[in-house]
Amino acid sequence: MSYAVELIDISKRYGTVQALDSVSLKVKQGSIHAVVGENGAGKTTLMKALYGAMHPDSGTIDLFGKRHTFAGSAQAIEAGVGMVSQHYGIIGELSCLENLIVGSEGSGVLNLKGAEERANELAKKMGFEFDWKAEASTLSPAGAQKLEILKLLWRNSQIMILDEPTAMLSPADSDALFESLSNLAKEGATILVVTHRLPEVFGYCDEVTVLRGGKWIAAMPVAETDPESLAKAIVGGELVQRPPLSTETGAPALLTVSDLSVKGPKGNLQLKNCSFQIRKGELVGIAGVDGSGQRELFQALMGTTRPVSGSIRFVQGATEQDWTNLPTRERLKQGLRIIPEDRLAEAVIEEWSLIENATLGLQRIPPFDKLSGNAVEPEALKIADLFNTKRGSLNDAMSGLSGGNQQRFVAARALLYDPALVLAFQPARGLDLNSTARVYSKIRELCDTGTSALVVSFDLDELLEYCDRIVVLCSGEFSEPKPDEGRDRDAIGRLMVGAK
């Protein structure tokens, strides 16, 4: 049988870490092939080898039966390989059309009229619509994803790599994206999808390859496996059991948000007269497409942004506190704990050691307010051990940890020290199935003893699996599903895009 892609015995070492160990991957032309595995399994590294963004230490790359050695991505693109990474390469200040053609202009003279005609043809083929003159900064996450895919078509990519393509999309947008990919595959395109979402694998993919710890574990047609078997292959054993949801409905409110409005970074109103309560012991999830006001809400609750109007009230013991304009340090003293969205910008200092990072944000509360220097080491060890952060010495810099292990450390730090209210923005970002379950199990354990938690995730299935209740943010406005639709994925998905 001939294959569009044959990666044979690909190996790559970074220092002491063997990222890939003789990994092979074969992909049929005209198919959608899923690549799955825990974080750190080597999925993205393998895709970077195919895309020419990483040169392997050993192994071979054959495309349509022809041997290739890529010195960089430009050569891979020329050979028909395109890649959309987890972080879009959209330049917000450029128009949608300029973003589409940048890097593949061909000459110093641009025929913008001809380019727009071709852009419209490609968009129509995919069922997309664009205002080509509009700034790309105006695009929704779904629009940005569609533009990235059109960039691959613009460059005549026959082999398309998509790394976690639906991480920021609503269920409806995710389904529409895979329908478009299925049409491309029917026309002969070869599509590799790196994903942790098993419903996508079983709903849309033809074959699946499993990596674990930088090694090839298994490859099979999707029709010949099932979700439980595939999940076990991914984690290498039994899955951590999901914690049971709470059925408590009569607990008093711990947090009350009333008519809250908050401006975004450009001065526009991103959160509009939002009101909701979180009961003591409740784990509440916020569903919504990216950019719906989640960040502005969290910034207001953290105290890093002052609301335009409205109020935030928090119950500490028997006393109700006004948090509306309270400094963040005072909220932390009253039990606020935060797992922020961007761990590098908001949660760690990469040049600092794990010991130094253990105190970050908690330096004014027990036990850290009375500790310094080496006396912090036992606490740093507790944090590292809670979710099994893979590390060297606690004195090593945080930059030496993988993204997933940094996330484990940040989540553990927020959950270990007497939280009353946990704000978690994508708490399982970059984590594998079992690590995700462990983080949520710890949050559930805390909620069972009176802590409350508010979680933002762009993975609706994650919220449905772990949260007691789900509310929806759409264009800065809150809504809740009807009582009989509180666990209905389709109903919540409709609210996420403003449909009733």
Image (spheres, grey):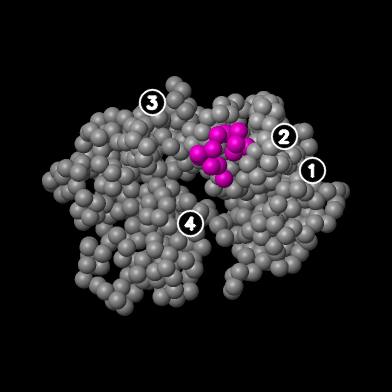
Residue at image point 49% right, 68% down: 400
User: Can residue 72 be seen at all in this image of the molecule?
Assistant: yes
Between the residue at mark 1 and the residue at mark 2, the CA separation in whole angstroms equals 11 Å
Residue in the foreground of this view, choosing between 411 and 56: 56
For the residues bearing labels 1 and 3, Cβ distance under 8 angstroms: no
Secondary structure type for disc 4 = helix
The answer to whether residue 166 is left or right of residue 184 is left
Residue at image point 60% right, 33% down: 97
Residue at image point 65% right, 45% down: 103
- Of the two numbered discs 1 and 3 on the same chain, state the one appearing first in sequence: 1
Q: Is residue 91 magenta?
A: yes
- Of the two numbered discs 1 and 2 on the same chain, state the one appearing first in sequence: 1
Q: Amino acid at mark 1?
A: Gln
For the residues bearing labels 1 and 2, Cβ distance under 8 angstroms: no
Residue in the foreground of this view, choosing between 402 and 267: 267
Residue at image point 59% right, 74% down: 16
Q: Which residue is mark 2?
A: 184
Q: Amino acid at mark 2?
A: Leu
Q: Which residue is mark 3?
A: 482
User: Which corner quadrant of the image does residue 364 belong to?
Assistant: bottom left
- Which dot marks residue 435? 4
Q: Which residue is mark 1?
A: 29
Between the residue at mark 2 and the residue at mark 3, the CA separation in whole angstroms equals 37 Å
